[in-house]
Image: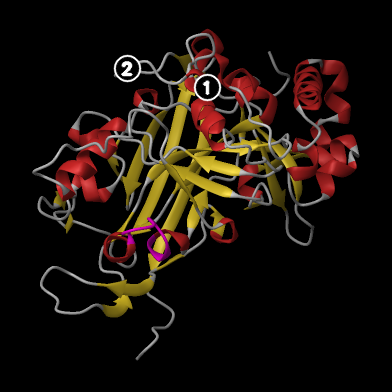
Amino acid sequence: MSWLDLPADTGFGLDNLPLGVFSTPGTEPRSGVRIGDLVLDLWAWSHDEDHRTGSLNAFLARGPERWAQLRSELRGSLTDEAHRGGTEPFLVPVDQVEMHLPVEVADYVDFYSSRQHAENIGRIFRPDAEPLTPNWTHLPIGYHGRAGTVRVSGTPVVRPSGQRRSPADDAPTFGPSERLDIEAEVGFVVGTPSALGEAVPLRAFPDHVFGVCLVNDWSARDLQAWEYVPLGPFLGKSFLTSVSPWVVPLAALEAARVAPPPRDHTVLHYLEDDEHPWGLDITLEVALNGERISRPPFREMYWTAAQQLAHLTGNGAALRTGDLFASGTVSGPELRQRGSLIELSWNGREPLTLADGSTRTFLEDGDVVTISASAPGPGGSRIGFGEVTGRVVPPRHTLSG
């Protein structure tokens, strides 16, 4: 029990303790930990220089022993009344802080690991063929994204422009995307780097990955469809990726670990995870203009984050502190478990009707999308992830010619 008066249903109790970067008016960004509806100023509390850099990177680079040590120190200070006087003065109400990007993102990789999502996309675009490509059940498919456009929740979503060509067009045109979409995803933040040329095995996943955040990988489907062949996503994805401000430690998710769904066949040895399964029972919620439209179940993901990391480094690619890799769109087998509008509206052919009577196929200017999530914690508690939110705004300018 904590000497703090924590709500019984808080997702930010002593079993969570997520880290983020915050500031208050007139102060520089620094590290904090969320506890209930408060933020503990880690720099003021500990005077550890790692916590005054405006990024979690320096702390994350110190590795699992230091991560566990801080977690133990925090739990002790927040439960032992003797530490109250040295802790309480450094607590700030969460509604009085501004949250910042929690890590300086080194590299960004996005995967494509939901079978339901991949099959839906396959059926939409290849209705007369097998929905999955032949390689899909053999390896976690992914692409390298643009780290420089990863931004914290609340960053406006400026409608992107680019080339697009519809089936009715004789030639491509350039202009604002007319098919702006969301992708509800879960992200994983790397703390400990690895050496170039050395693969990271499945069992070493928690030695390198500190924790989990939420991701909205905004997607311009019309730009993406025209540019996709032969090299994959480019301008249709690179304009913005939004992340939640709190990074939930892997250590907080032990009660949420589950076995992944059955595989179609035996995977190659470096992806075998029978002894180290890292499926996670995380339930996402997607809201459009305040109305919940979907509840994607992360436990249904075919490939786990540990397998994604093993594959990402299987060729010897080095990890860097601050690397972010995302799961890909999370979708379940039911209609209202789909994690993107392209699935929910079946590529615009089945418009989504909202409570106010309006309909959506893709996002309109002014729309606000919020993704939140929770997972089981010890003793029936819940682990909260906060949320990642973005409002769509019109394009700032359009090139001509």
**Quarter holding the N terminus?**
top right
In terms of image quadrants, where is residue 141? top left
Identify whether 266 is placed above or below 125.
above
**How is this picture coloured?**
secondary structure
The residue carrying mark 2 is 265
Residue 99 is left or right of residue 293, and the answer is: right
Label 2 CA crowd tier, 10 Å (few <14, some 14–19, many 20+):
few
Give how far across and how far down residue 38 sits, in percent. 66, 37
Residue 319 visible in this rendered orientation of the protein: yes
Please tell me the numbered disc located at residue 270. 1
Give how far across and how far down residue 294 sits, in percent. 28, 38
Question: Looking at the picture, which amino acid does disc 1 mark?
Answer: Tyr
* Front residue of 391 and 396: 396
Q: Are marks 2 and 1 in contact (CB under 8 Å)?
A: no
**Helix, strand or loop for disc 1:** helix
Question: Looking at the picture, which amino acid does disc 2 mark?
Answer: His
Residue 256 is left or right of residue 289, and the answer is: right
